[in-house]
Amino acid sequence: MSSERGILESPWVTCQQWKSECVSSPRLSLKGNQHARLLAVLSLLVVSSCQPATSDLVRLEPSIPAPAFTLQQLDDGTVSLASYRGRVVIMEFWATWCGPCRYSTPSLDSIYRRYRHQEVTVLLINEREPAERIRAWVERRFMAPILLDTDGRVAERYQVAGIPRLFIVDQHGQIVYDRSGYGGGLEQNLTLVLKELLTSNRAVSHGG
């Protein structure tokens, strides 16, 4: 698999944005039947084109080096990805306006609370939003570090074209899993992946 795998646009998010636009946009002035038919077509697109892309974490084989970055935290100092070498890093690109992110970020924070003392960290990388807006939405609910990609440069390095976009970096700084969008089951899937990565690392450490 080429190094471009794992940095593809999330079609589920794109379809959801189109769906939202058709439901709520004041710019659309379709009459009753036209509106209903359009929504029906878009619903089929969401089911047929988007749902499979969000079902599971995808393993990258071979794994690829995670691009380095240093970002400011929401209410603390800076964070460098390199400082987490030796730990599993789960990072997600997200924004407060992103509907699926409202489901994925609490799940990731739950994972952080469970595993933060087991060589695992979670980085919630917000895309291009002011700190005041993020702070108002978060309302002190999250323990996981929230990072500010204010100019989108880190997302560009990871070629993120749709959010939420999740990457898992192993203890050696390699991207080993990725996921586009949010389709449920995130905590369960991450628990299985973390068990695998932590167990294999302990075996190597003990010469197994």
Image (spheres, rainbow, N blue to C red):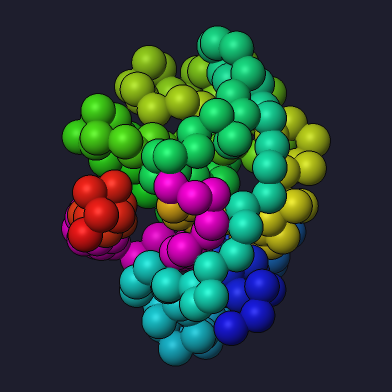
Residue at 32 percent across and 36 percent down: it is: 119
Q: Compared with residue 5, is residue 179 higher up or lower down, i.e. above or below?
A: above
Left or right of 161? Residue 64 is: left
Q: Compared with residue 207, is residue 41 higher up or lower down, i.e. above or below?
A: below
Left or right of 118? Residue 19 is: right
Identify the residue at the far front of this view.
207
Give yes or no for residue 115 being in the magenta stretch. Answer: no
Residue at 40 percent across and 17 percent down: it is: 139
Give yes or no for residue 191 being in the magenta stretch. Answer: yes
In x, y percent, where is residue 73?
Answer: 58, 20
Quarter of the image with the C terminus is bottom left
- Is residue 45 or residue 106 the one in the foreground? 106
In x, y percent, where is residue 166?
Answer: 49, 55
Bounds of the magenta segment: 171-196
Q: Compared with residue 148, is residue 179 higher up or lower down, i.e. above or below?
A: below
Residue 192 figure quarter: bottom left
Is residue 19 at all visible to an observer of this figure? Answer: no
Residue at 25 percent across and 28 percent down: it is: 117
Is residue 88 at all visible to an observer of this figure? Answer: yes
Count of numbered badges drawn on the protein: 0
- Is residue 196 or residue 126 the one in the foreground? 196
- Is residue 206 or residue 62 the one in the foreground? 206
In x, y percent, where is residue 87?
Answer: 40, 39
In x, y percent, where is residue 75?
Answer: 54, 11
Residue at 53 percent across and 68 percent down: it is: 63
Left or right of 108? Residue 79 is: right
